[in-house]
Amino acid sequence: MTLKKKRLWFTMVTSVVLILLFSIVTIQSFSYFSRDTIREQGRMAAEMLRISLTEQMRTGVIGERNTLFKRLRTIPGLDDVRVVRGEPVIRQFGPGIEGEQVKLEMEKRVLATGQWEERFFSEKDKRLYQITIPYIARSTGSLNCLQCHQVPEGTINGVVTLGFSLENMRHSELFAILPLIVLLVVFGLCLGYFLKRLFAPMVVTVEELKSVVGSAIQGDFSGRITSSSKDEIGEIAKYTNILMDTLDQSMGRISDRIQSLGGHRRSDGGEKNLLNHTVRMVDEMVGATRFKQAVENDLDLNEIYGRIRHVLKEHFGLHSFSYYQVEEDDKHLALIFAEGLQQESELWCDPEILMNADACRAKRTASCVSSINNPHICPHFCGVAQEQRDMVHVCIPMRLSGRVGGVLQMVMTAEEAEQYPDIEQTTKLYLNQAAPVIEARQLMKSLKNTAMRDPMTGLYNRRFIEEYVDTLTASSLRQNSTLGVLMCDIDFFKQVNDNYGHDIGDMVIKELATILKKAARASDLAIRFGGEEFLLLLPDTDVEGCKELAERVRMMMEEHVFQTPQGPLKKTLSVGYSMFPEDGAGFWECVKYADIALYQAKDRGRNQTLHFQEDMRSGDMEQY
């Protein structure tokens, strides 16, 4: 209901209620006054009748009382006059004439109690009033009842019943109330007119305010309100206009600055509601800031990528997307996660981009690639999913250390793209917040990886073992499996350095590292333990498996020919191995036992593999 209708209804209801209230109060007042008047008339008439009857009795003409009754009935409104004798009078003077006997219950009660009664009732569509008043014997006053009646004082000698017609009084009430009602109607009309004039500025201001605010909601801040009064309503119009001026001047500038975040400008086909767009972008900025606070506390890259995945699914409501990481060589892409595909082996892009990073347009150009308005912008989109031709994609590159370090790809239907007109801009807010954290974590990972690898061979070094030994042993104990520990050493390696030089010695170490990588399984760990010593860790491997691998490594080393400037060179390898936790309760204890077995192999002629036995601990072997 509009304010104008409310004002109309308020005026009408207020006027009608006031008229009804005043009318009811007036009618009730007149009714009370009329009843009180007729009641007093009845009492006066009863008293006059009592006096007249007493005089007739004193003068001896009481037998003519019917004539008195007839004269009283000629009084306007007095329709009925009856005198009823009580028992004391009947005993003294007899029952009297016809009509002086009790007819009404009210008369019986008054004769019994001595208290007058009255009633208002209708009979034959006529309003009537009836009152019954007792005659009580008194010896005081102007009339001494005891002079004629032989009764004790206070005896009820009889009652008089008077009946009045109220029709004339009702007409009188009507004529008396009608002018008042007319006055009340006039008052109500005047009140309605006054209220209308009083509320008119408010209604006009509210209607204009509704129009101005409605336009502002749609992003149009040019509306203004006409000030039609100098009271608070006028001040509301004034301050609203000031507010609209401020919004008109500043909101567009604020929105433009927000839109420019990430180098993206809102297109003409985007959100047309400037206010909603600005508010939404501010909300996204707050969300992105909180997102940054969360990822800054994540331990590793997997947690950060998981949080990005969660934001895409829960916050943006996307079902199909993927993220690719650019490898360190800047030539390959690695899939980090993908959603919305039926099989894990599928990609939203041609697999060629994994082998050739430049095949990805977003990586190559370092700019956003969107097929929403340009359906054929990227020929590598949807590799094995080409049948989904109703899908569009938005690929956003993430810049790390001045280069593209990753690419986020979002895949949507055309309808979903219309629901998220600013998906590119808002997603970049989150990526921009995550980028420095990802860059820092990658740098830490690279530094940590560098510190844990031997720079010459690329194998893990002793520091790696010290860092992860607890994890390795705990995993073996938890799975109730064994861990093979192989210690390898090049036979007579010092002669290589002495006879061929350290460059050739380094070459031998590098090529041995390559042999170890080829011989070991993907789950095995090859470690340069120090100098020409190498350690192989074989998870979930028994003694036979360790022996087999040790022999394979030894034979590959024996058969390998090192090509040097001084000619071909062949070297052999000695290997000692132990089993954790069969041979020792601690990991480093097993490493020591493998080292003891290694030197037993050297002592027995080299170029052989030995499993640690308890008797190897005796004698001179304790020095190892």
Image (tube, rainbow, N blue to C red):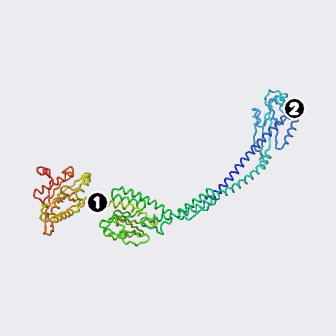
**Residue 442's spot in the image, x, y percent?**
32, 61
Q: Quadrant of residue 96?
A: top right
Amino acid type, mark 1: Leu
Residue 204 relative to residue 248: left or right: right
Residue at 69% x, 53% y is 15
**From the viewer's perspective, is residue 34 above or below residue 567?**
above
Which residue matches tag 2? Answer: 57
Q: Residues within 10 Å of mark 1 (few under 14, many from 20)?
A: few
Residue at 68% x, 56% y is 194
Which residue matches tag 1? Answer: 447
Marks 1 and 2: which is nearer the front?
Answer: 1
Amino acid type, mark 2: Met
Q: Relative to the observer, which residue lies in front, 461 or 71?
A: 461
- Kindly identify which numbered label has been placed on residue 553: none
Residue 451 relative to residue 295: left or right: left
**Upstream in sequence: badge 1 or badge 2:** 2
- Numbered circles on residues, count: 2
Q: Residues within 10 Å of mark 2 (few under 14, many from 20)?
A: some
- CB atoms of marks 1 and 2 within 8 Å: no
Q: Relative to the observer, which residue lies in front, 70 or 397?
A: 397
Q: Quadrant of the N terminus?
A: bottom right
Residue 161 relative to residue 22: left or right: right
**Residue 43's spot in the image, x, y percent?**
80, 37
Spatial separation of the CA atoms under disc 1 and disc 2: 141 Å
**Residue 241's spot in the image, x, y percent?**
57, 61
Helix, strand or loop status at disc 1:
helix
Helix, strand or loop status at disc 2:
helix
